[in-house]
Amino acid sequence: MKNVILVVDDDKTNLSLAQRILGPQYRIAASNSGTAALKYLETHRPDLILLDINMPEMDGFEVMERIHSNVHTESIPVIFLTADALAETEIKCFQMGAMDFVTKPFVPDILLSRVSKTIELDQYRHNLENMVNDQAQKIMEGTMRLGRIQESVIIGMANLIESRDGSTGKHVKNTQTYVGMIATELLSRGLFTEELTPEYIEDLCKAAPLHDVGKIKIPDAILQKPGRLTPEEFETMKQHTTHSRQIIHTIIGDIEDEHYVGLVEDIALYHHERWDGTGYPTGLTETNIPLSARIMAVADVFDALYEERCYKPPVRPIERIIQIMSEGRGTQFDPVILDVFIDMLPQLKELLHITDSAT
């Protein structure tokens, strides 16, 4: 069965053009106003909405607000259509929650590609949410802790998200490893023993892969941008922490293991907080930041520096990374955790197969 696309545009020529371009592959429903589109959505649920911005009576942004305020339509992906190619318009589209935007007049291949990609990504998201929900429900009904099946689903979901920014899941595995190493070393030194136990570390390692799950809601244009983000784009990127907590609450919030759920939510929401209170999303300071998030902050930054990203080459040698991170001692990072991590340099070199002569 063909996917259904609702095209909303007050220009009949654009509606006809969209029908000609997309009609062979998709079922097209057309609305010539925002009011007509909202009326259609009362009884239908399309797989994608192509929404013109500049329309009389009710513009596309107002229609988008109403779509997102309705529990029955809020999850439908939206691509904005606009003849305005200004950066401000593009930024506002993404801030409103659009998956993408297409400029008019349409270029057939571009329109087809972006529609196909958006529908495919949304289907992945639905499938993964269903898989995780099914596994979580089975675990909850059996009153048992997370097992290997759910762990593989969690890893799979995290890997899919990471693959969108080109890291192919490597960041997920790396940070999980580093988090486990740091926590184990802290425990061996008798630090944070009021929280750190072998069971805590086990749960921490299970929680780590979901720390960036909210990136699934960040537009590809921002997530995959090869250069520095603009202030507006960075504000959008920062929202991934709160998106993460919302997604985690939806997926595993009903699990009876409240400690594990809380640990996952904390590590996802707070791993970009800074020791001096200048981080996000809430500006927590020092030990007000959960221990799990303070550990993840160190692991996350180290891997971001060591590995290549779309916006930067890898930093070498590893001693340069340690030097950079040392500059954040007591400002960005928990000084105790960072000191222990720096002491672990020989273990990191062994893990990463780095010899003293390597760069």
Image (cartoon, grey):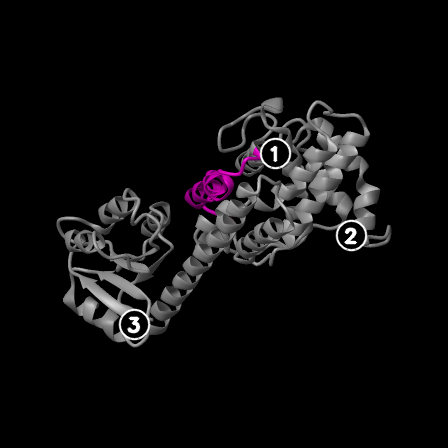
Residue 273: which disc? none
Q: Badge 1 is on which residue?
A: 293
Residue furthest front as drawn = 142
Q: Nearer the viewer, residue 301 or 184?
A: 184
Residue drawn at (43%, 53%), measured in percent from left and top? Answer: 219
Q: Position of residue 175 (x, y in %)?
A: 66, 46
Q: Badge 2 is on which residue?
A: 352
Q: Nearer the viewer, residue 238 or 261?
A: 261
Q: Identify the mark nearer the N-term, 1 or 2.
A: 1
Please determine whether, in this image, residue 100 is positioned above or below residue 297: below
Q: Local crowd at mark 2 within 10 Å, few (<14), some, or many (≥20)?
A: few
Q: Position of residue 142 (x, y in %)?
A: 57, 43
* Three-letter residue code for mark 3: Leu
- Examine the structure image and report whether residue 215 is included in the region drawn in magenta: no
Residue 2 found in image quarter: bottom left
Q: Badge 3 is on which residue?
A: 22
